[in-house]
Amino acid sequence: MRIVLQRVKKAQVEVAGNVIGAIDAGVMLLVGVTHSDTEKDVQYLADKVANLRIFNDPDGKMNLSVTDVGGEVLSISQFTLYGDTRKGRRPSFVDAAKPDVAEALYEKFNQVLKQRHQLVVETGEFGADMAVSLVNDGPVTIILES
């Protein structure tokens, strides 16, 4: 799995002009799944997202997690994170998992964030054409891989 995590002041996702997910302060995640991913990858990255210390403590040091600060999560499925651009001018997406496999692992990832880590998780719509907007905080952008 591959995740692009951005610390945000707010973020939202729209489908067909309707807001279907929105958060205030927290993290916005673009989540990609590849063929070899399993529930072990899901657990590892959910734990990493929930506990990654990227929020400032009272001394201005990044010592707090999204869980510590009561932040929210906006999770967006993003198969294009596995786009390979090494050849030609059009990305190849052969490394992205098939939709049925990717959707099941993406949904499980969101469940783990909600159930194990007690986080508020908003989502986009798997496979939909989405418009995502955010106000990046910092900016802080981290790439996570399992």
Image (cartoon, helix red, strand yellow):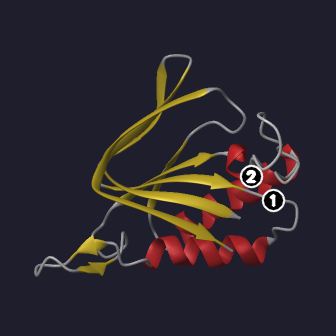
**Which comes sooner in the sequence, label 1 or label 2?**
1
Circle 2 residue:
82
Q: Position of residue 62 (x, y in %)?
A: 27, 78
Q: Secondary structure at mark 1?
A: loop
Q: Is residue 88 above or below residue 142?
A: above
Q: Is residue 132 rendered to the left or right of residue 37?
A: left
Q: Residue furthest top?
A: 17
Residue 34 is labelled as 1
Q: In terms of secondary structure, where does tag 2 sit?
A: helix
Which mark is nearer the camera, 1 or 2? 2
The amino acid beneath tag 2 is Tyr
At a point 85% along the width and 53% down the height, the residue shown is 97
Which mark identifies residue 99?
A: none
Across the whole image, how many numbered discs are drawn on residues?
2
* Distance from Cα at disc 1 to Cα at disc 2: 7 Å
Which picture quadrant has residue 71? bottom left
**Split into 4 quadrants, where in the image is the N terminus?**
bottom right
Say what amino acid the circle numbered 1 marks: Thr
Position in image of residue 125 (x %, y %) = 63, 36
The x, y position of residue 110, in whole percent, is 60, 59
* 60 left or right of 49 in image: left
Mark 2 and mark 1 in contact (Cβ < 8 Å)? yes
Q: Residues within 10 Å of mark 2 (few under 14, many from 20)?
A: some
Q: Can you give x and y, in whole percent of width and height, for residue 39 in the image?
A: 77, 72
Q: Residue at x 87, y 68 (%)?
A: 36
